[in-house]
Image (cartoon, helix red, strand yellow):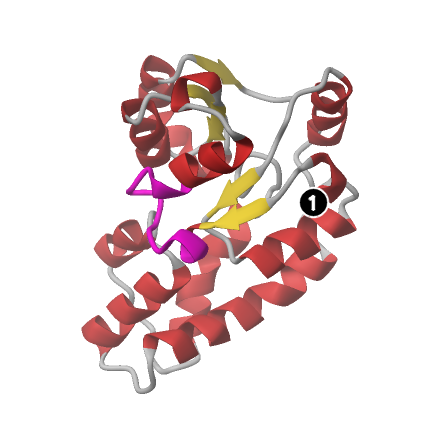
Amino acid sequence: MDGTLVDSMVYWKRLAAEFLAGRGVVQVPGEIMERIKPMTMTESAALFQREFGLPGTPQSAAAAMNAMMDEHYRSDIPLKSGAGEYLDRLHKNGVRMCVASATAEHLARACLGRLGVLGYFEFVLSCEAVGAGKNSPAVYCAAAQRLGAAPEQAAVYEDALYAVRVAKNAGFYVVGVYDESAAGCWDEICSLADETIRSF
């Protein structure tokens, strides 16, 4: 969803820094920001607590970060240009679709519902629900299983290099979707994915 269907990556990019700044951490090493990219919110929160000695539990920190993103998902994160028409065309052609996202399910549903595209998807499945981030193929495999499909019968749309690699290695047909947040590794995404799209 994020970076493929909706233009939310800029909001996520500044979330960790915003969350940590509110807790007195003003210098966040770039290496930490890279490490959290494939993680669930709870995994990221646990890392922040270990690295910066923050109080509370990973669950309470994750809840605070989710609350910070909630308003954006409910009010101003937009669809990528052409994504709505693309989903409508797939739907009219009988393509069965779901959302498999690192974003919490209630946030994904709120955003896609506001944008008028939630009805195209049979279900929304989060990495949190399957207990693993996108550095594991678990969420893709669980989504395919719910659709009654083997990996080779399903297409995964991804904008992040690590996710493209994981889905491809798990046997899925992978469509690389261009997003500014992954511009630096677009060439590598193009070399791994079965096909790529720069826009819808």
Please identify the residue farthest to the front as the structure is shown: 148
Q: Nearer the viewer, residue 29 or 176?
A: 176
Q: What stretch of residues is rendered in magenta?
A: 128-139
In the image: residue 121, left or right of residue 193: right
Q: Position of residue 23 (x, y in %)?
A: 38, 82
Label 1: state its secondary structure: loop
Q: Nearer the viewer, residue 169 or 36?
A: 169
Seen at 49% across and 45% down, the residue is 101
- Is 32 located above or below residue 93 in the figure? below
Q: Position of residue 78 (x, y in %)?
A: 69, 45
Q: Is residue 168 magenta?
A: no
Q: Position of residue 135 (x, y in %)?
A: 29, 42
Identify the residue under disc 1: 78
Report if residue 25 is visible in the image: no
Report if residue 26 is visible in the image: yes
Total labels: the figure holds 1
Seen at 74% across and 31% down, the residue is 84
Q: Which amino acid type corresponds to the residue marked 1 in the rendered image?
A: Pro
Q: Is residue 130 magenta?
A: yes
Seen at 38% across and 17% down, the residue is 193
Quarter of the image where the C terminus is located: top right
- Is 179 located above or below residue 57 in the figure? above
